[in-house]
Image (cartoon, rainbow, N blue to C red):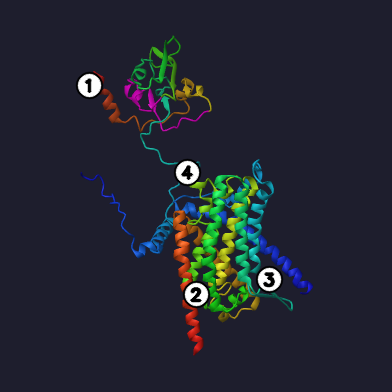
């Protein structure tokens, strides 16, 4: 790796980090607006034009709040919890191909931080470590509600990660690669994986909701039963990190869904326009972000439509519904490819 | 028994059909409902900028009217205090002295006239009882306070300023006049 690539990667990393944070920040705003609109209300509209400064005001409020660490809490783990949640949420963005290649001078740069050949597994690893943020935080709080929330989070994640992994196996059968870069490149034009793996996409989407702890799967923090679940004892910016990590996770999982099933930065009929390669890259990136925002909207839409699952319903759906369905999907995909390869 | 509305649904614990058990049709139906609400007109009234229109006969803060020449109409007869179901009105009568003809319309006037706004139930009975068309309820809202005592409004707040007349034409209609003058009613005999 030569020096210019290094500089480019550093700048690119900074931009991606910034974009992730800003998108997550304005997701909180969008969430409140979407919620309000669906309930025939206006939502935040006092801070700045259309309430656009509301996220800044919220952030400032979080910083200004008194920092409380309960006496009986395990201090180190108590601080470690939100740190892990936030770090892992941000780390996942590294393997996502945000765009095709960018040509500056005679250098060609890839708009992907790291093209790991096991990109999907890396995403899974990071999401799985993210559970530790919730578990450690909930356990270290030394509070029954927090602990219950943490236990729920852990069991929910394990149950839904299985079905998620199974749906990905079927996807890998069709793509033949674990690298996210290759998977996106294969979906050029309109060959989006969602058309080849509709059932897999459906399962993956539901599991993504469960993995990000979003309604209707927000049992770990369910306000009505657990007061706030794993973050009951948290205050100030540590609470802010937990809440913020949820939105970062939402952004990243939207990006992963768009990458895996909706062609990532591929836009249909872009080749016919006869644009330069850099223009194509930028339009592709914009299109990728439109896809991401569409999924973020879907996340919110679902949240403000459905009530929360009961715990046994959640487990039933995960183990008796999605897991067999995912295994069936693998079998069907495998059988199809076995017989087509015979010819 | 006869039903009051046609909205009641018979509850049952029958087994769910397959379509009901996979949730998806119900979820899509719910999502279609929320998305229609997304584009509907908002019910919110942005309060300080927009205000909800008051009813024409809204009963808010009282006013003690002056006549066209700026003299107080109230003669401290005490009928409003008697009519008041909340016993919110108290007054002290006084006799008009020579030279005060431009202040008070008749020989007797209210030296002190107090309404306790916390006791008042804004029923408007004082207005009905008043034979001199002196007291009216208006569409003004009683301002909030931190203490209790400021809610006892004296003449300084209640009497309308001569340069800032309060419009009560919506409440002082000809029908109201008839009601007060018609000898067929017991209260006018």
Point out the image quarter for the N terminus of chain B.
top left
Q: Which residue is mark 2?
A: A330
Residue A209 coordinates in the image, percent (x, y)? 51, 61
The tag on residue A114 is: 3
Residue at image x 44%, y 19%?
B114
Magenta stretch: residue B142 in it? yes
> Compared to A175, does B43 lie above or below?
above
Q: Nearer the viewer, mark 2 or mark 4?
A: 2
In the image, residue A295 sits, relative to residue A189, either above or below, namely above
Q: Secondary structure at mark 2?
A: helix
Q: Which residue is mark 4?
A: B50
Q: Residues under labels 2 and 3: Cα distance? A: 28 Å
Q: Mark 1, residues whose alpha carbon is within 10 Å: few (<14), some, or many (≥20)?
A: few
Observer able to see residue A3: yes
Characterize the local packing of mark 3: few (<14), some (14-19) or many (20 or more) Cα atoms within 10 angstroms.
some
- Disc 1 to disc 4, how far (Cα)? 45 Å
């Amino acid at each position: 790796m030569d020096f210019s690539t290094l500089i480019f990667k550093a700048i690119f990393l900074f931009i991606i980090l910034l974009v992730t944070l800003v998108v997550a920040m304005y997701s909180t705003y969008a969430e409140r607006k979407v919620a309000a609109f669906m309930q025939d209300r206006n939502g935040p509209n006092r801070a700045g034009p259309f309430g656009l400064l509301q996220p800044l005001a919220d952030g400032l409020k979080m910083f200004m709040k008194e920092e409380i660490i309960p006496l009986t809490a395990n201090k180190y783990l108590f601080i470690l919890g939100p740190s892990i949640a936030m770090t892992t949420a941000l780390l996942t963005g590294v393997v996502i191909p945000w765009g095709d290649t960018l040509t500056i001078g005679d250098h060609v740069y890839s708009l992907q931080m790291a093209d790991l050949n096991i990109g999907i597994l890396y995403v899974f690893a990071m999401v799985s470590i993210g559970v530790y943020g919730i578990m450690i935080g909930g356990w270290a709080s030394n509070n029954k509600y927090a602990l219950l929330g943490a236990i729920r989070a852990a069991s929910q994640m394990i149950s839904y990660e299985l079905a998620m992994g199974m749906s990905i196996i079927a996807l890998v059968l069709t793509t033949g690669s674990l690298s996210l870069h290759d998977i996106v490149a294969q979906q050029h034009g309109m060959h989006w994986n969602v058309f080849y793996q509709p059932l897999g996409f459906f399962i993956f989407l539901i599991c993504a909701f469960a993995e990000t702890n979003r309604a209707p799967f927000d049992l770990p923090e369910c306000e009505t039963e657990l007061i706030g679940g794993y973050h009951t004892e948290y205050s100030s910016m540590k609470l802010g990190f937990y809440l913020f990590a949820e939105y970062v996770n939402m952004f990243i999982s939207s990006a992963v869904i768009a990458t895996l099933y909706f062609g990532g930065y591929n836009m249909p009929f872009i080749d016919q326009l006869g644009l330069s390669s850099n223009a194509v890259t930028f339009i592709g990136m914009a299109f990728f972000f439109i896809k991401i925002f569409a999924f973020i909207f879907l996340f919110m839409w679902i949240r403000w439509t459905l009530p929360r699952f009961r715990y046994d319903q959640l487990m039933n759906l995960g183990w008796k519904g999605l897991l067999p369905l995912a295994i069936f999907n693998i079998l069907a995909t495998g059988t199809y490819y076995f017989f087509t390869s015979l010819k | 028994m006869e039903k009051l509305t046609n909205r009641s649904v018979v509850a049952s614990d029958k087994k769910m059909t397959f379509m009901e058990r996979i949730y998806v049709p119900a979820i899509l139906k719910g999502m279609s409902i929320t998305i229609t609400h997304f584009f509907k007109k908002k019910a919110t009234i942005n309060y300080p900028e927009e205000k909800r229109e008051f009813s024409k006969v809204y009963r808010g803060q009282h006013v003690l009217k002056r006549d066209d020449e700026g003299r107080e109409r109230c003669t401290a007869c005490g009928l409003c205090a008697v009519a008041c179901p909340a016993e919110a009105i108290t007054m002290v009568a006084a006799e008009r002295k020579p030279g005060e003809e431009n202040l008070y319309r008749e020989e007797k006037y209210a030296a002190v006239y107090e309404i306790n706004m916390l006791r008042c139930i804004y029923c408007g009975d004082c207005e009905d009882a008043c034979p001199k068309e002196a007291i009216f309820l208006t569409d003004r809202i009683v301002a909030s306070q931190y203490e209790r005592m400021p809610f006892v409004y004296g003449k300084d707040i209640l009497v309308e300023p001569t340069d800032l007349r309060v419009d009560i034409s919506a409440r002082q209609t000809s029908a109201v006049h008839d009601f007060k003058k018609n000898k067929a009613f017991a209260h006018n005999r």
